[in-house]
Structure formats: C-alpha cells, structure tokens
Amino acid sequence: MFGKKKMSLILAGVLSLSLLAGCGNSGKAATTTGEAKDTKAGAAAGTTEISLYTGGSLNVKELWETLIKDFEAKNDRIKVKLVYLPAGTGGASTLDRLIAAKKSGQTDVDIDLYEGSLDDITRGAGEQLWDTMDAKKVPNLTNVDETYLKQVNNQAIPYRASSVVLAYNSAKVATPPKTADELYTWIRQHPGKFAYNDPSTGGSGSSFVNTVIYNFLPPEAMNSNDPANMKKWDQGFSLLKELGPSMYQKGVYPKKNQGTLDILASGEVDMIPAWSDMALEQLAKGLLPDTIKLTQIDPAFTGGPSYLMVPSLSSKKEATQEFLNYVLTPEAQKVVINKMYGYPGIKWSLMPSELQEKFNSVSSGYRSFNSGELQQEIYKRWQSEVAGG
C-alpha cells in the first residue's frame, strides 16, 4: 500500500516537471546543442525539419513551394518548413532576430536557411552570422561561378539572379543602342520616347541613374560606400539633368518599375530600362506586345543575385546543406528559370540549350552595384537637381 502511494507521487512529480518544462519553452523547443534538435526531436518521425525564411513577392513563395515539394518527393528524411514573411508585415526582420540571438549568447535558432540580399550578407558578416559555404559539404557548389562566391567570401550562395536591361519596341526601333553613349544620343534624338522610373521607387530607374553616374568613376567605386565618391558625382548628375527635357513628357518619371513597363506597353514610349525577369514574364503572359525586345548595353546596367545563407547558429546544417545541394542542380534551376524568369544561380553552360537560347538576349552579363548608405544620397540629390531642377 505504502509502495503504491510512493510510486504515484514520483510519477506525479515527473509529470509536473515535464509540463513546467513545456510551458517554459513558449511553444519553441528549447535547445542548446545540435543533438537535441537533429536527433532527439527528429528521431520519432525519422525526419529532420529545417526552416527556410524568405520574403519578397508572391512568386518567390510559389517558387519555394514548388522546389520544396520536388525535393521532399525525392527525400523522405528531410522536411522543409517555409516561413514566408512579405515585406511590410511588421515586427523585427529575420536578420534583426538573428543579430539579437547572436548578441544575447544564444547557441541555437530556428532559422536554418535565410534568403536575403547583398546588404544582409554584409551586415550579417560583421556579426559573424553566416556559415562558410564549402564544396565538401555542398558538392554542387562547383556548379556556381566562383566569381560570385568570392564576392561574398563564400558566406552565401547566389541561387538565382536578374539584371536591368534595355527594353525597346522593335516596330519603332530597328537598331537599338549598343553602348551607354549611343543610348544617350538616341534619347536626345527621340525626345519624349524614353522613360525611366523615379529611382527611389524601383530598381530599374535606380540602375539607370547609378549607371549614368558611375560610368564616370573607376569600376571599383561601384561597390564602395566611401563618402569621398560623392565628390565625383557631378559629371553624372550634369548628364542626367541635361537629358531631362528629352525624357517622357519633358521630364516625367513614372513611379515603380511597372510604371515604365505600362507606358512601353501602351506605346507612349519606345524604350525603357527594365528588370529582365519582369519583362520576360510579362512578354510570356502577353502583357507586353511581342514587338518588345530586350538587350544589354555596354557598359552594362546593374543587376545581381538573390542569396541563400546558413546561419552559424543553426543546429541542422547537414540537412540544410543537402537541400542546398538540390537547389543547385540543373533540374531545380530549370524551375527557378521557368517560375521566376530569372537567370540561374549555376553556370549557363549547365542549363539546357533551349533555355540558353531563350535568354540569349539578356544573359550577356551585368555589373554589381552596392554603395551602401550612399544610395540614399543619390536619391536625395536626384530629387533636388533632376526631378526638381
């Protein structure tokens, strides 16, 4: 009798401690080592679940849903949880959360893979947030152009890309400009037939403005945040101001990337800078006339990849690396191209010949541009001297 009561008390105590431990986690498994999450938590189901955090437009979400479904169909040991956070949803950003976790001394986070920008990589690198990418761990990393990996010190994987190109109406423009100087001459000779959007409202207009300004600076300045470069902007702003009266409606700058695509589609202008992926998608869907063609100029407009980073605090790196290895296969990259109308993250030579041909007009290269906080200074000066000049 006494033994049964004692055993009941012991069991009740164990149950109480278990419930208290569960309440203390606030709905998140408390872990301090990789073993706890990777083996113990996943052992029951025989799988490891990794969390991919991403944002952006809806087509980014749809891309990942497709890639995850295809990956999981081939791999029953790893599940990928997609955490989609559209811009402007409020709360601290994913990057801010990672930085806070690092500074507070946390040893584990529930963010195993993060899609972000060059700014995110740079900011996170200062906090030692990112794991170094290694072909021994992700064999298909050899499919990626080494140049793009070196640009980020192997702390991120460029899994897709796009660039700003010249979009023109071939029914009105038989021979498009091939160089930046030829483009400026064409604008002067065809007043009102060229437009670029307010640079602070979209990347295509921003690329046009940055290209005009930085073509007068040394190439290395394009990825520098040195304030001394501001003193070298005068020639570029002088040219932008001079071209103003030859622009659409003598100096009207549409809002957002779509604003210029709309007036190109309606025939109000014959030429604009446009994002390659946006233009290709709208051509495929019949939202742009089939007379619209795309080309790149020399020196090229700017563009860049979207990157994937593995947080150093993640305890599920092996499973994450296996998923990354799949993303860098030609099979997965075909999905990237067909869903996003973007460039592959791997070398073009590894892609099917029909896709290489399809993107031939826009895949001739682009320049990267990252001036940090100087970009805001460009916008301010543009508003004052060009838009309001």
Image: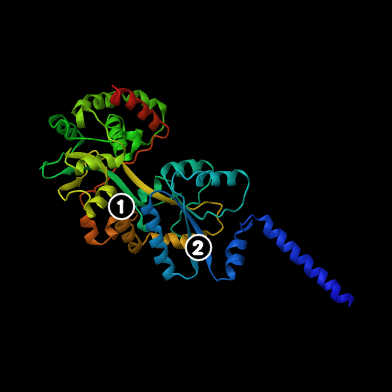
Q: Horizontally, is 148 left or right of 181 in the view?
A: right
Mark sitting on residue 319:
2
Mark 1 or mark 2: which comes first in sequence? 2
Q: Position of residue 219 (x, y in %)?
A: 31, 35
- Which dot, 1 or 2, sits closer to the camera? 1
Residue at the image point whose x is 21% and y is 56% from the top: 358
**Residue at disc 2, secondary structure:** helix
Relative to 102, say whether 12 is above or below.
below
Residue at the image point whose x is 19% and y is 35% from the top: 194
**Amino acid type at image mark 1:** Gly
Label 1 – label 2 distance at C-alpha = 26 Å
The way the protein has been coloured in the rendering is rainbow
Q: Let me know if residue 141 appears in the view.
A: no
Residue at the image point whose x is 57% and y is 53% from the top: 109
Image quarter of the N terminus: bottom right
Q: Position of residue 268 (x, y in %)?
A: 17, 38
Relative to 41, say whether 157 is above or below.
above
Task: Answer few, some or many: residues within 10 Å of disc 1's Cα (few below 14, many 20 plus, some between 14 and 19).
Answer: many
Q: Horizontally, is 107 left or right of 138 in the view?
A: right
Q: Position of residue 247 (x, y in %)?
A: 20, 30
Q: Let me know if residue 211 appears in the view.
A: yes
Task: Answer few, some or many: residues within 10 Å of disc 2's Cα (few below 14, many 20 plus, some between 14 and 19).
Answer: many
Residue that badge 1 annotates: 342
**Amino acid type at image mark 2:** Ala
